Image (cartoon, rainbow, N blue to C red):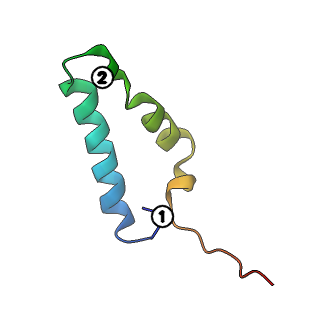
Amino acid sequence: MLAGVKPADNMALLEDLCHTMKFGSLCALGGFAPYPVMSAVRHFREDFTPRVLAAAE
């Protein structure tokens, strides 16, 4: 994701993976594991986008 290659496709894939884990897990731990990722995407979406780093001088 941070490399900037197909960011919209990668975000959709991440959200789909979280949904699959949340509803497809056979145990509570597996079903709960995607919640921190989903929360980070919801509240800090800009952290999942590519950044241009300033050159060190």
Q: Is residue 18 above or below residue 52?
A: above
Report x, y in % for residue 50. Answer: 52, 67
| Residue 57 placement: quadrant | bottom right
Asked if the residue at tag 1 contacts the one at tag 2, i.e. Cβ–Cβ closer than 8 Å, the answer is no
Going by the numbered disc 1, the residue's amino acid type is Leu
Residue designated by label 1: 2
Crowdedness of circle 1 by 10 Å Cα count: few (<14), some, many (20+)?
few
Q: Which image quadrant for residue 55? A: bottom right
Is residue 1 placed above or below 19 in the rendered structure? Answer: below
The residue located at (36%, 22%) in the rendering is: 32
Mark 2 or mark 1, which has the lower sequence index? 1
Q: Residue at x 56, y 40 (%)?
A: 43
Alpha carbon distance from label 2 to label 1: 26 Å
Numbered circles on residues, count: 2
Secondary structure type for disc 1: loop
Asked whether, in this view, residue 4 is left or right of residue 57, the answer is left
> Residue 22: image x %, image y %?
28, 27
Q: Secondary structure at mark 2?
A: helix
Measuring from the top left, give residue 36's x and y in whole percent.
47, 32
Q: Position of residue 16 (x, y in %)?
A: 26, 43
For residue 31, which numbered disc appears in the image? Answer: 2
**Above/below status of 46 relative to 20:** below
- Out of 32 and 45, give the one closest to the viewer: 32
Quadrant, the N terminus: bottom left
In the displayed structure, does residue 6 sit left or right of residue 37?
Answer: left
Mark seen at residue 51: none
Query: In percent of the image, x 26 and y 31: which residue is there?
Result: 21
Residue found at the very far top of the displayed protein: 28
Q: Count residues near mark 2 (Cα–Cα under 10 Å), then give few for <14, some for 14-19, many for 20+.
A: some
At 50% from the left and 61% from the top, the residue drawn is 49
Residue kind at label 2, given as amino acid type:
Gly
